Image (spheres, coloured by chain):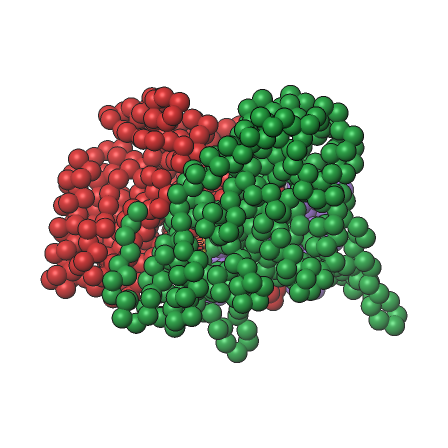
Amino acid sequence: MDSFEPKIVAFCCNWCSYAGADLAGTSRMQYPPNIRIIRVMCSGRVNPSFVLKALSVGADGVLVLGCHPGDCHYLTGNYRARRRMAIAKKFLEYMGVEPERIQVGWCSASEGSRFAELVGEVTDNLRQLSPNRMFND
Amino acid sequence: MKKIKKQSVRGLLEKWQKDFSVFVPSKASGSSQMAVWDGQDLAFLDRNRNTVVPPKANFLPNIEKMFGFRKEEDGYVLEPADEDAPRQLIFGIHPCDARAIAIIDMVFRDAYEDKYYLSRRQNTVLVGMACAAPYDNCFCTSLGFGPADATDVDIMLTDIGDSFVIEEITDRGKEAVAGAKDVVEATPADEKKAGEVKASARAMLSKEIDTDEIAKRLPAAFDDKSFWEEIAAKCVSCGICTFLCPTCYCFDINDEMLKDGSGARYRNWDCCSFAVYTRMPAENPREEKWRRVRQKVYHKYSFYPELFGIIGCTGCGRCIRQCPVNWDITETLNNLPAGSAARTEEKQKPS
Amino acid sequence: MTKELENKLREEVRNLLEKGKVDRVIGYGAGSLRFAATPLIISDKADVDRLIINPFIHNNLSVFLPDVSGKVAIVAKECDARSIISLVQNKQIPRENVYIIGVPCSGIIDLGKVEKLTGLDRDEIDDISWQGDKVTIASAGGAKEFTAQEVLADSCLGCDAGGFREFDLVIGEMKPVAADKELIRKRIKDMEAMSPAERWEFWKNEFSRCIRCYACRQICPVCFCDRCFVEETEPQWISPLPRWQDNLIFQAVRMMHVAGRCTDCGECERACPVNIPLGILTGKMEDIVEELFEYRAGMDKDAPPLMAAYQPEEAEDLIR
Ligand code: SF4
Ligand code: SF4
Ligand code: SF4
Ligand code: SF4
Ligand code: FES
C-alpha cells in the first residue's frame, strides 16, 4: 500500500506534555509535521467524545499525552485519563476502529526528545494504515 | 369497484415502479417501516400490520435539506435544495396513517404552505389497505373513522381472500389504476364480501375513548397539577411517542457550516417530550415533566380541535405499543378529572 | 406461586406505608398491553393491591429514583438492585433514603424474542406459561414449546444472581436464573470474530436506522447527567441530524460514559424502537471494565465509582 501522510490530533496537557512539545520545538528537534496540538489543562480533561470528534472530522489518529504517572499537576488526572483512554481504546477497537488510531502516552516537560520520538513512532504506525475514511458515507 | 387477483399484484407493483418509487411495509432494514419495494417480497399482501415508523417519514423526513448557502463577496448566496420531490407511491398504508397525512395537511398545506412538504405530498399516490388485523390497542373507531375508511387515500384495497377489491377514490388514484393489466370489474358478490371484511375489522376493535366527554373535561383539567404529575410519573421523556406518532410534526432547524463559509440548512424531527425543546436563555416554560406530558395530550386533543376542528390523533396506538414504560394515552383521556369534586373517584383501574 | 409472592409483597408494602417507613413505593402494575407490566409509583395504601410481580417485569425501576422525593421503597430484581447501588456509588441518591425490596427472579421473558420465535405480535398470543425450563406459547395457531433459555432476556442469561447482598428485604427466596453465559456471549463472540472493517460496517448499518429518539438514554438509570453532551452547542460534539455518523458517535460516547456504571440491564436495547442491538455493546463494555480493572458496577456501595478511582499501576500495556 502506498504510504500517506497521516493527520494526527494530539491532546497535550498544559503542564508536562505541552511543555515537552515546546521544548522539542525550542531545541529544534526534528519530528514529523503531521501533528496538530490541542492544549488541554490536564490529560484528565480528555473526554472520549474528543477522540471521536477528531476522528470524525478527518484525523487519521489521535494522541493523548499527559504527565507521567505520579507527576500530574492535579495529582490524579492522568490516572483517570488512563482508565478512560484504556476503555476507549478497547471499546472503539471492538466497534471497528483500528487500535493504532488511538494512542496514549506520557511525556514530561523536560522530555523534548521523548516527545519528538513519540510523534515519530505514532506517525510511522499510522502510515502503515490507510487514511481514515471511517466516517465517509 | 374493481378487483385484482393477489398473484397479479406483483405485475401492478412492477407497472407502478416505472413511474414511482414504490414504498411498501417492510422489516428488511431491521425496523418496521415503509421502504422501497425490492421487487421480490410480497409478504405484506397477506400480513400488513401497521409499521413502527409511520409513513409521515415519507413526507417529513428526519433529515431534510432546506437549502445550501455560499459566502460571496457581497453577502450570502442561497442554493435551493432539490426542486421537486421524486414521485412516490405508498402501498399498503393504513386508513389511520392516511388520516394522519390529511391532518398534517392542515398545518403544512392550509395554515402555511410548506414547499418541502407540499412537493412530496403532490407527488405521492396513497394506496390504502383496509386493516385485516388491527392491534388490540388501536382505537381509530373512537376518532370518527375506522380500520377500513377510504376517505384519505387515492386507492383503497380490501382483501377478500384470493383478490383485493379496488376502490378508486381520487382522480390520481383512477389514473394510477388506468390501463393496469389484470384489473377487472368487481362482481356484486365481491363488493358484498369486501363490505363484510370491513365490518368485521371494525368489530375487532375494542379499545375506546369518549371524545365528547374528553372535550368537556379538558378545559378544567389543564390546571390540575396533581393529576398531571401522577399521570406523568412513569414517563421517561424519550422521543418515541412523538417521533413515531403519525401526526406529530415538530422540527428543529440547524445550519451546518463548512470552513469556507458555505453550508446548508437542515430540518429534523424534534419532540415536546424533551426538556431542551422549550429551553430558552431566561427560562424553560416546560422544564417539569408533567407540563410536557400535558402538552402532548393537549396539542392533539385540545389545540388541534380549536385550530382545525379535528382531533390530532388517529388512534393508531403506536405511542402505546412502542412506549418503553407502556404509558397509555387512553388511560389518561379516560380518567381526566371531571372537575374538582370528582377527582377523588378517579383512581384508575388497571385493565 | 406468583400470586403468593404478590400477596406477600403487598402485605410488606402496606406495612411500610402504614408505619411511615417510606413515603413512596416504586413497583410494577398491570400494563395496558398484553402481558405488559408498567412502572407504578404509589404513596397511598389504597393503591397497594395494584402491585404485581410476574415474569414480564422488565423495567429497571431505578431510573425513577433520583426524581422521586422522600423515602422510597423500590421493588427490585437483582440486576435492578445493582443499578440502585450504582446510583448510590455515584452519589445520585443517598443509600438511607432507599428501601430495596428484592423479588426472586428466575429471569424475565423477552417479548421481543417471543415475537421473533413465533412470528406473531404479542397481541396475537393468548397465553405464555412457564414451567421449569419449558415455556409454552399458545395462540390461535396452537401451542408451541420453547426452552426458557430461548425466550429469556439476554441480560438474564448473563445474570449471576446470588452474589448480591444489599436488599433491605427479600420477598420469598432468591433462586438462580436459568443462566447460559455461552449463549449470551454468542453475540459478542460473533462480533469479535469479524475484522475491524466488518465490525465498523455492521455498526454503520445498524446506526443508520437510529431516529435519535434518545429512548436508550432516557430509560437508562445510569445516564443521569443533567445535560448530555449531545445537547452541547459550544462546541457541538455531534449534529442533531440523525445521520449514521452522529448516531454512532452518540451511542459510542454514551457507552464510554456509562462504563463502570452500566450493569448491562438490557433496558436500552429493549427500549430502542428500531431494534438496534445495544446489548452487544453494553455486554462487551462490562467485560472490558472487568478485565482491565476487576470492577463490576453496583456490587459494593462503598466502592468508589470506576472513574473516580485508580490503581498506581494498571492498563500500562495500553499506554506508550
Ligand atoms: S414514549 Fe413513553 S416514556 Fe417516552 S416520552 Fe412517550 S410516554 Fe414518555
Ligand atoms: S397520539 Fe398515539 S394513538 Fe394518536 S395518532 Fe399519535 S401515536 Fe397514534
Ligand atoms: S433508542 Fe434506538 S433509535 Fe432511539 S436514540 Fe437510542 S439507538 Fe437511536
Ligand atoms: S446502558 Fe443500557 S444496559 Fe447499561 S445500565 Fe443503561 S439501560 Fe442498562
Ligand atoms: S496535568 Fe499533565 S496529566 Fe494532569
On the image, the x and y values in percent for residue B177 come to 73, 34
In the rendered image, residue B192, in percent from the top left (x then y), is placed at: 55, 30
Outermost residue to the bottom:
B282
Q: Is residue B108 above or below residue C61?
A: below
Q: Colour of chain C?
A: red
Seen at 33% across and 39% down, the residue is: C35
For this rendering, which residue is in front, C126 or B53? C126
Q: Is residue B3 left or right of residue C210?
A: right
Q: Is residue C48 left or right of residue A23?
A: left
User: In this structure image, what is the colour of chain B?
Assistant: green
Which of the four quarters of the rendered structure image does ligand 1 lie in? bottom left
| Residue C153, picture quadrant | top left
Above or below, B230 relative to B167: below
x, y percent for residue C110? 37, 35
Relative depth, front residue between C285 and B265: B265
- Whether residue B141 sits left or right of residue B11 in the image: it is left
Q: Residue at x 59, y 36 (%)?
A: B129
Q: Position of residue C317 (x, y in %)?
A: 49, 42
Chain identifier for the purple-coloured part of the image: A
The answer to whether B65 is drawn above or below residue B159 in the figure is: below
